[in-house]
Amino acid sequence: MIPIAKPMIGAEEKEAVFQVLDSGMLASGEIVRQFENEFAAYLNAEHCIAASSGTTALEVALRALGIGPGDKVLTTPFSFIASTNSIIYTGATPVFAEIDEQTFNLDPDKLESALAADPSIKALLIVHLFGQACDMDRVMALVKKYKLLLIEDCAQAHGSLWKGRKVGTFGDAGCFSFYPTKNMTTGEGGAVVTNNAETAEACRLLINHGMAVRYHHDRIGYNYRLTNMAAAIGRCQLKKLDGFNQARRENAAYFTEHLNHSNVIAPVINPDAWSNFHQYTIRVLNGKRDALADLLSKKGIGYGIFYPLTIPEQKCFEQFNFQTSWGISDKVKEQVLSLPIHPALSEADRREIVETINQFEI
């Protein structure tokens, strides 16, 4: 079996966790502070606030920036549901714009149309989907023109670049996930990065019951802290992240070079973006996606369909009466199929994946 994802946990991570266990300091503490400092330095950001998940990081960032009831946040309909849920948690209203058919990221032209149509939109929450940066030149121009707050969902984009600059550092806040399938993991966990000291302080209060001083609660907060055990894993993983990303890029290059099927379109990467290839997501044309998925399953090759439904059409959102018809998003959701791309792939694994797809009969 070739799995779609495989966390790369080594002896270093295990030893780091044992050291935390031996210390008796298991909850959020000095190890978390060290991880925050190291992750901020990696991104060249001023502040990092570790959180219990990527979803809580998004919620905390939005709340810290003052997003709440009555506000509108423009975002993508084609992503994991957390990007929209985090908006709803704050009491704000999600507004959607269409994606680009090639990159799967928000289409800047459609963003501008949505912003021009509704001047009351306060913030933009973009998703660097599958590890490819959004067009940050266009995004930042829109942020400036329409005076928007910008939150970057970097849950899949650890180390990804736009014109040499790491994503997560362009907006008012960048949010990361460290779930086990991500390019680096803490087991479960997330982080907010920001260059604004006031935003950082608000995030720190929000993740810790609103406490700056123990048992003195300055605002209503939450228990969204990361543990020392998780941070210990994260510190080890961060040292390996660039190597993990490079291995993914090499696997991606192999697939792009060797995949040769008339019904398969390889990922299209913007030349100004450096993707960490969190996913290698092909498009399978002419209604053949599910048949190819069945073949991969029979061959013991893992795959992912991210995402079979757009966010607005999810059953849990029926009460909001979101627009549920999206031309491009509805089209690509029937075509996308993600292949194993993780660093543990062997040469034989890569060859088997390519041969299986290339020999797939129409």
Image (cartoon, helix red, strand yellow):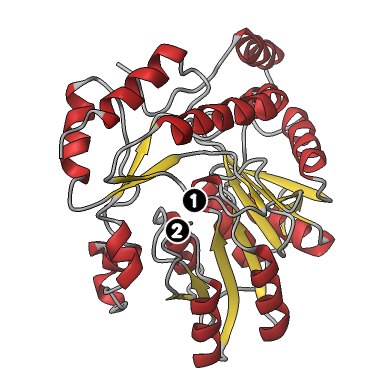
Left/right placement of residue 362 relative to residue 260 reads: left
Q: Amino acid at mark 2?
A: Gln
Label 2 sits on a secondary structure element that is loop
Quarter in which the C terminus is drawn: top left
Q: Please report the residue visible at 56 percent of the width from the left and 66 percent of the height from the top.
A: 125
Q: For this rendering, which residue is in front, 213 or 166?
A: 166
Q: Contact, CB < 8 Å: mark 1 with mark 2?
A: yes
Q: For this rendering, which residue is in front, 351 or 77?
A: 351
263 versus 35 height, above or below: below
| Residue 186 in view in this figure | no
- Image coordinates for residue 280, horizontal then vertical, percent: 44, 39
Left/right placement of residue 240 relative to residue 321 reads: right
Q: Amino acid at mark 1?
A: Val
Residue 21: name its quadrant: top right
Question: Which mark is on residue 194?
Answer: none
Label 1 sits on a secondary structure element that is loop
Q: Please report the residue visible at 80 percent of the width from the left and 50 percent of the height from the top.
A: 47
| Residue bearing mark 1 | 268
Q: Please report the residue visible at 46 percent of the width from the left and 18 percent of the height from the top.
A: 345
277 versus 331 height, above or below: above
- Image coordinates for residue 53, horizontal then vertical, percent: 53, 43
Q: Residues within 10 Å of mark 1 (few under 14, many from 20)?
A: some
| Residue 141 in view in this figure | yes
Q: Please report the residue visible at 23 percent of the width from the left and 63 percent of the height from the top.
A: 315
Question: Which mark is on residue 102?
Answer: 2
Query: Which is more N-terminal, label 2 or label 1?
Result: 2
